[in-house]
Structure formats: C-alpha cells, structure tokens
Amino acid sequence: MATVSPAIESHSDDHSHGNDHGHGHQQSFFYTYLWSTDHKMIGKQFLITTMIMMMVGGALALAVRWQLAFPWQNMPVLGPVFKLFLGEGGQISPEFYTMLFTMHASVMIFLVIIPILAGAFGNFLIPLQIGADDMAFPVLNALSYWFMWPAIACFGTSFFVGGATAGPAGGWTSYPLLSALQEAAPGSGAAQTFWLMGLTLVGVSSMMGSVNYMTTIINMRAPGMTLFRMPLTIWSMFITAILQAFALPVLTAAGFMLLTDRIMGTCFFVPAGIVVNNAAPTIGGGQPLLWQHLFWFYSHPAVYIMLLPAMGMVSDMLSCMSRKPVFGYKPMVYSMAAIAGLGFIVWGHHMFTSGMNPALGMTFMTSTMMIALPSAIKTFNWIGTIWGGNVKFNSVMLNCSGFVAMFIVGGLSGIFMAAVPVDIYFHDTYFIVAHFHYVLFGSTLFGVFAGITFWFPKMFGRLMNDTVAKWHFALTFIGFNGTFFPMHLLGISGMPRRYADPYLHPYLEHLLPMNQFITCSAILMGFAQFLLLGNFLYSMYRGEKCGRNPWGANGLEWSAPSPPGHGNFDVPPVCYRGPYEYSSPEAGALNQDFILQTEVPPDMSKIATAETAATA
Amino acid sequence: MKKFWALFFFFWPAVAFWSCWIARSRGWWFPASEDNPLGLAMSPLGQQIDGLFYLILGIVAVVFVGTQFALGYALWMSATKEDSKPAHYSHGSHSLELIWTIVPAFVLVFIALYQMNVWAEFRVQSYFPNETKEDGPKLEVTARQFEWRMRYPAPGQVLSNQPQAGDLYAVNEMHVQTGRPVKFNLRTGDVQHAFFAPQLRVKQDAVAGLIIPVWLEVPKAGKYDLVCAELCGWGHYKMRATIVAEPKEKVEEYLRNLEQEQNFDGVAPAAAEE
Ligand code: HEM
Ligand SMILES: [Cu+2]
Ligand SMILES: [Cu+2]
C-alpha cells in the first residue's frame, strides 16, 4: 500500500517497511481508493460518505424547520435549489413537507448514523483494536460499502422521481395503510417503492458488515486479547453486530411484504373493504398492526444499534482523557449486554396507543422501565470514570462530556414515555421528537464528533486543530440544546409531530415564536458543521503531524504506525493487559501515565526494591 | 479555560432547568385557555395522568440535577487541581455499583407498578367506568382523509356497527354529555389516524379493520380540540375538529336538530302539494 496518499505515508513515524509485502504490492488508484478491501480504507470511505450524507440530511431538516417557523413562505437558499431539481419547492407544499421529514429521518438514520458507527468506526477500529491485520472477510467488507451506493441511489430516486408534490409520504416508520396503498398518498407510487428498496439495500449492507464483525471479533483477536481485555468499543461493536444479525431479517422480510402489498396487492397489512380516495375497496385479509410489530421489532433494537457503538467509543475516550481506568468495566459490559437483550422485548412501547391488546401495554411498560436501568448504570459509571481523574480538557473530552450530559436528558425523557398513561398524551407529539434527538443526535453524534477527532491521527497521521474543534463543539452544543430542549415544552403543549402547519389549531398558535427560536438555533447548529468539515479536510493535508500515540492511549491501535500500513502492525501484537490501565503502578514504573496493551510487563519486584532502597 | 469548560457543564443544565421552571407562566405548558389558565386536564382521567406526569417530573428533576451536578463537579475537580497530581487509579467499586443498580431499580419498578391502574381504566374494557357499560357506545367516530365523521344512533336506538337507517351524521363536531363517562367506537375509513384531544389527555389510534372502544369524561361544559396524531397523508395537519361538551338536554336537542335537518327533504312544507 505504498501508494496510499504519499503525503500521509511519508510521515508515519519510524514506519517500518517490513510489513509492506515488498513493493510488489503497489496498487492502482482504483484498487486503493475505490475497490479497496483494506478495512481502513473502507472505514474512511464510509466516514466520508456518511459525513456528506449528514450535510444532506441536515439541509432537509433545515427545510422542515423553515416551514415550522415561517409557514408557507418562500424558502431562502434551499428553495431555489429544490426548485431547480424538483421543479417546485420554493414554497413548501404539504406534500413536500411530508416528503421532507420522511427523507430527513431516512437519510439520518439509514445513511448517516447506522453506517457511521458500524461502517466507519467499526471497520476502522475492530481489526486495529483487537490486533488483527484485517477483517475476516475483506471482500464482503468492500461489498458492504458498495451496497450503500445503490441504497443511496434508491433513496435519491425516491426523493426526485415525482417532483416536489409526490414522494415517500409515510414517515420513516412507513405505517400502512398509508404506505401500502398507492392511492392513499397520491403520486407516492414509485417513490415509496424506491424508498423500500433503499431500505432493503441498507439492510443488506449492514448484514454483510455484521457477519464480518462477529467473525472477526471472535476469531482474530491477538494472543492475550481475552474477551475481558477487549476495549469497550469492541464489546459494543460485537453486541451491535449480534443485534443487527437477529433483528434485521425481520425488517427485510417485512419490507418485502410491504413492497408486494404495494405492487402486487398481496394484502399482508391491508384489511378488507377499505376505500381510500375513492379507489375500489381492498380485498384484504391483513392487519396493519402486524407491520408495526415487525417494524419495531427491528427498529427498537436499531435505536441501540445507533447508540451502543458510541457508548463504547466514549467509554474508551473518557478513560483516556481522564487518565483513569474505566469505572466498572464489567458492569459496563454487562449493562450493554442487558440493553441488547432487553432491547428485543420492548418494541411495544412505540405502540401503546396503537390499539394492541392493553395487557401487552403493561408488559412492555415494565420491560421498558427495566431497560432504563442499564442505561442509568452506564451513566453513573461514566461519571465515576471522570471523577478523580486528571482530565485533559480538549475537544475529545468536551464532546464526550457532552455525550454523557445529553444522554442523561434523553434517558430521563424516555421514562415519561415509558409510563403508558403519560405516553397516551405524549405519543406522537414533539416530546418524542425531543427524546430521540437527545439520544440520537445529542449522544451518538457528539460521541461521533469525539471519535473523529480522537482517531483522526490514526487515520491520517495528523492531528485535527483543537481550537476549531472546540468552537465546533461549543456552537453545536448551544445550537443543539436551543433546538431540541424547547421541543420538550412543545410536546407538553400538545404539539403533534409531522404537522405542516400546526398554527391552524388555535391551541398551538402561541407556539410560533418558540418555533422560530428553535429554527434559528437549528440554523446555527447546521452551519457549525462546516467547522467540522473544514477542520477535517484541512487537517487531512495540513494538520500537525503526529506519531503513533499522540494521546498517550493504551489500545493496540496506538502501537501501530499512524496511519497503519497494509497489515496494520509492524510485528504481530501480543496483549498483556486490559485497555484501561491509565495511571497504574505499572505505568508509573515506566514514568508515564499510560501503558500500552502491548507493553511487556515491567519487572515490578525490581522497581519495588529499588523504591524501598531509595526510601530507606 | 479548564474552569470555563467545567462551568459550561454546570451552566447549561441550569438554563434547562430554568426554562422548565418558567415554562408554565410563558404558556409553554399543557394547553391552557381563558377559563383554564393553568392548563389543567379537563377530564378526571387526564388529571390522574397529569398527577403521574408530575410525579415522574419530580423524580426526573432530582436525578437530572444530581447527575448533571456530579458531571460538572467531576470536571471542576480536575480543572482546579494541579496537573502534576496523578489520577486516582481505581477500577470501580462493587458497593457503589450495587447501590446504583438497586436504588434506581426500585424507583423504576415503583413507577411501573404505580400506574397500572390508570392505564387499565383507560384501555382495559373490564375496568371502564360502570356508566359506560350501562350506556353502551354513544356514537361512532370515523376518521377519514382528512376529517372526522360522527355517527349517532337515531334517538332511542342503540348504536350498531353497521350503519342503520335513521342514524345521524355530523362532520368535525362531536357532542358529548358533561359529567358522565361517554364511550364511543373509534374506527377509520381509510388509513391510520389517531384521535387526540389534548385538553382531555385522550389519544387512541384509529386502525383499519378494528373498532376500538374509547371513553372520555368531561365535567365542564365547553369546546375542546380534537386533532389527528398519526401521520395520515398530506392533510394530516388539518384534521381539525371540536368536541362540544354540554349538559344532557343540550346534546339531545342537538341530536333532534340533526335529525330534523337530515330528514328535511329540501321541500318547504308550503309547497308540499306538488
Ligand atoms: C432510558 C432508556 C429509554 C427509554 C425508557 C425509552 C423509551 C421510549 C419510548 C417509550 C418511546 C416511544 C414513545 C412514543 O412514540 O410514544 C421511545 C421512542 C423513541 N426512542 Fe427511546 N427510550 C430510551 C432510550 C432510547 C435510546 C438510547 C434511543 C436511541 C439511541 C432511543 C430512540 C428512540 C427513538 C428513535 C424513538 C422514536 C421513534 C419514532 O417514533 O419515530 N430511545 N423511546
Ligand atoms: Cu424503542
Ligand atoms: Cu389523520
């Protein structure tokens, strides 16, 4: 891989060529940057793709916010863009509004959060952190990336195929019958179908990834890397992969059923005799609630797929930046396992008002309350990790602290909604919107921002600019809270979600100023992301060069060159201890506050005698 | 700078707390109106729901302040000590883990169990108020893209699931008697919708293929909002209707008027000779 960006390669400190399989391994641009089977390149591909998608999803969100703050007024900047591509959309029509929030959620969930965690970080970190030279199935890995593109194409087609007046109109949850009967949302025909195909392709991509991650983590750990010496990142990726593997097939099957309902009239989800928009009555025999059960059977575990990896990475980073072992490593592992296990039996909390058997409501309430417990344990342990540490106040640490602070809010708002009677009121209001943005954006994305800054040196051999990153953190944090905290209050005020014009209802009229405040905050937050992108691009070529271990961290990845060459390590690593032995006596014996997992244990007895000799 | 960032993490929860504190006086709280300035729930069940909400709010506020303070304080401790002092080397504490597992577990189980009966009263038919069992459903509410259709049985008749000759129809206006639980059947004519009466704290999805019994009780005469809370297409936001709560006689009068209107054949009595 000598051709991997020469600018980067040249300053991998003391880079050994012993690993380069000679120079016969020179590869063309195509094999290096496009069809690469190297997990690091695939990870970077995922990272850059998802960051671009994040900007797309963000633009859609700002369009949604525009309508809520200035209903039916011409949209600046974005309006002309939409007009150019869709022929319409300068002023948002109700149909277009429906499509905007549907696509915003779909892009953010399926093209940003899921692939950035498992795809980008999972790929980059798993082999490096367990001491493997690559993934178990490199070709499958490349395929998992390249299946994202047809998925993106399908989602893109669904957005553009019908112009601004017709698009996927079912929300990201796509409840039938709205999503099952073409007539229910005039013009959504091809769009909704493409949307479903996009969803399926994302699923295929994730499944290929998850098989790979499980196999790699089980089979390819370096000597000495026992299960309980694995960094929490690896544990979280492992548990996430298991969740994916078990939950995803259900969604895929359900997606195909909905697809055939739409195009062949199979009526899996459609009961008899329904007349929509003066079309002929349906033949029926199906049940719309079945879709909700199948969808949430996947999508509740999926919300943890969208969080657990961030939890793992944040645990790693907090420990490193506090120069202190993770507080309660095993409870952290067990609570992630508990979240994953319980995650399979709480899906019904999305359906409390759906009309399902009310006894089920009580069962799901209890299991949902229980799942808040491991979340609480993790929070306490994170705070315990920082407590008494020697905190480095850099942007990584700030983003991680932001993660913890925001996760607390999201977890606590979950308790209101887990309480069924209270959820009767809150279901499908802005309270829900506030809740899931606190967990998905507030937690996961802040964790991701930290992760990008933390592992950037390993990816590119250079550091990101910390001052810019701090500004990015501060502006995003302020914009974020200004955007989403008031949404709790909107929810309490009874403002339903997915309304193109809430102010039609007198009891919501007075909320307009607050919505305008929210939109301003959202714009601030959106533009702050350019700091991240700019910092990322600039630092890739101009950032301060760094050695193997700029943070003084312990993981195996930090014993490899930055960036690691083909095969990752100069010598196959051997792991002697857990990943969090910051400030341990062993580290002290080396006169530092960290000790790499690969460091041969220093002879403590000698040091001890030397010390006693000194004090005597 | 270190102290600044530690204070930053103290500061924002304070702002968050403050904004909740002033929310009610600013109108960012449960929907209020002139005769209900505090935004209280306008139904007995709603008041129980609000009670649960405030109970959880209390617990959550304590936990929020406690954990955010702990986080801020942990950062502050680091920000104010000299750099040379090493971190405290510890892998955790078994007894702390036990405490912070068991205490929240009790609180959560308590919250879960404490509200079972409110839920049962709202949704489990055998727990419905007795009056609703005696009276049977008073009307059928059918959600359609994008309106609410009411079907009342002809005066003196009982409601049946199939439309009957003599049934009375109205759109976007639902009349219920005050001071007595009223049961109605909820269904949809097309896609899924949800019956949401914010001031009454009632929400129930209308699902294709199901007829779902719902009840509500409004002690105080007045007009209350009825909106749709489940995405049902482009016009989701405009499914605006009114629940009119009024004394029994008024409801009866309304129904009589409705009947007259409906039976009126468009032919004025004077011209009846034709
Ligand atoms: C403390 C643990 C949590 C509890 C008790 C909880 C509870 C709930 C409940 C009851 C709902 C359904 C509310 C409704 O629609 O009426 C919900 C929605 C949601 N939750 Fe959570 N939650 C928790 C943590 C999380 C986490 C960690 C995530 C994601 C990382 C998450 C993501 C979501 C999403 C995306 C939705 C809404 C989906 C939609 O309707 O579009 N939640 N949560
Ligand atoms: Cu859930
Ligand atoms: Cu509706």
Image (spheres, coloured by chain):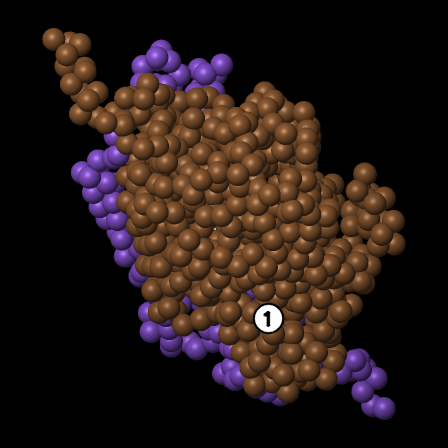
Of residue A52 and residue A93, the one placed in the foreground of this image is A52
Of residue A3 and residue B212, the one placed in the foreground of this image is A3
x and y percent of residue A241 in the render? 46, 57
Q: Say if residue B49 shows up in the picture.
A: no
Of residue A196 and residue B106, the one placed in the foreground of this image is A196
Residue at 73% across, 74% down: A183
Left or right, A233 with respect to A605, comes to right
Residue at 79% across, 58% down: A160
Left or right, B226 with respect to A157, comes to left
Q: Amino acid at mark 1?
A: Gly
Residue at 61% across, 82% down: A267
Q: Quadrant of the C terminus of chain A?
A: top left
Of residue A593 and residue A476, the one placed in the foreground of this image is A593
Which chain is the one coloured purple? B
Which chain is the one coloured brown? A
Label 1 crowding class (10 Å Cα cut-off): few <14, some 14-19, many 20+?
many
Give the labeled residue for mark 1. Answer: A255
